[in-house]
Image (cartoon, helix red, strand yellow):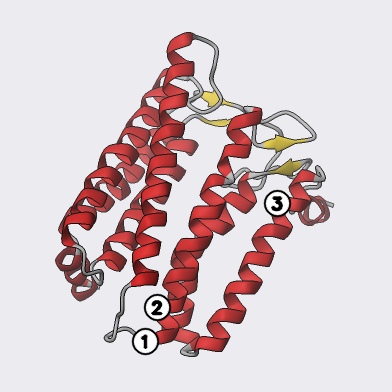
Amino acid sequence: MMSFLQQLAYRDESLFIFGLCNLFSAGLYIVFSFFSKTIILGVNAWIKPIKFALSIGIFSLTMGWFIADLNAPAITNIYNWAVIIFLGFENVYIAIQAARGQLSHFNRSSPVYAFMFVLMGLAAALTTLFTGYIGLLFLSQDFPALPAYYLLAIRLGIFLFVIFSFQGAMMGAKLSHTIGGEDGGPGIPILNWSTQYGDLRIAHFIGMHALQLLPLLSFYAFKNVLTTAIAGMLYALLAIYTLLRAQKTRPLFGEIFKNSVQ
């Protein structure tokens, strides 16, 4: 484990430190959740900061690992600071709103909250666009030291990440992640995905985490270009299926959890 962490730090020190800071903050938020009785949309106020801090931390460490293989030091340095500034802002603001017992996302109850919500959307969009540009660099450069199947998985992972990151705009446009009902109803443990209605967060989550899952599976399990390509296609179809199901107001886990209760 220490050797792996040392490699992470060596490959991209800035995103390594930022990633660890986010994981550490997620740990703090978990502690806060045990002492907080504040409820937002039916769940502990600190659940959202925990999820975002974990997601940002994992994303930062992942991209830090990937971009170390690019031959573009000036671009990657700018990218590092863009990630740190934009996603650092999101992490801090979401935590502040949780501490205040206020919504961070979809909150237009005051001009200030509405402005901050727009800023969060802009920060996420700019990070996604820049990550898409990093993906183009992975398409345009040669990487003789990387296995072809692993390189394909990185490219596919970034491609799906960008698409399903922007899918989050669907939630921003309707100021809700639930289709067919109101946010805050019954959901699965921890992730809180709706068990009653369609939930746009599921496709968002699955698509974005192709960034980690596809390269890991390709490098350690598939070790083959064709298998990686097929897995990437099936993974994309899974994300699309969950999106279409949500748009039809159908929960993905509703029957499972209803049967478990019965």
Q: Which mark is residue 243?
A: 3
Question: Does residue 75 appear left or right of residue 230 in this picture?
Answer: left
Question: Does residue 181 appear left or right of residue 154 in this picture?
Answer: right
**Which secondary structure lies at badge 3?**
helix
Labels 2 and 3 touching (C-beta < 8 A)? no
Q: Which mark is residue 151?
A: 2
Q: In the orientation shown, which residue stands out farthest toward the top?
A: 110
Please name the residue shown 49% across and 29% down the image.
45
Label 1 sits on residue: 147
Q: Quadrant of residue 69?
A: bottom left
Sequence-wise first label, 1 or 3 = 1
Q: Position of residue 178 (x, y in %)?
A: 70, 36
Q: Position of residue 76 (x, y in %)?
A: 23, 57
Please name the residue shown 81% across and 50% down the image.
258
> What's the distance in space between the residues labelled 2 and 3, CA to CA?
27 Å
**Tag 1: residue type?**
Pro
> What's the distance in space between the residues labelled 1 and 2, CA to CA?
6 Å
Mark 2: few, some, or many residues within 10 Å (few <14, many ≥20)?
A: many
Q: Nearer the viewer, mark 2 or mark 3?
A: 2
Please name the residue shown 70% across and 51% down the image.
243
Labels 1 and 3 touching (C-beta < 8 A)? no
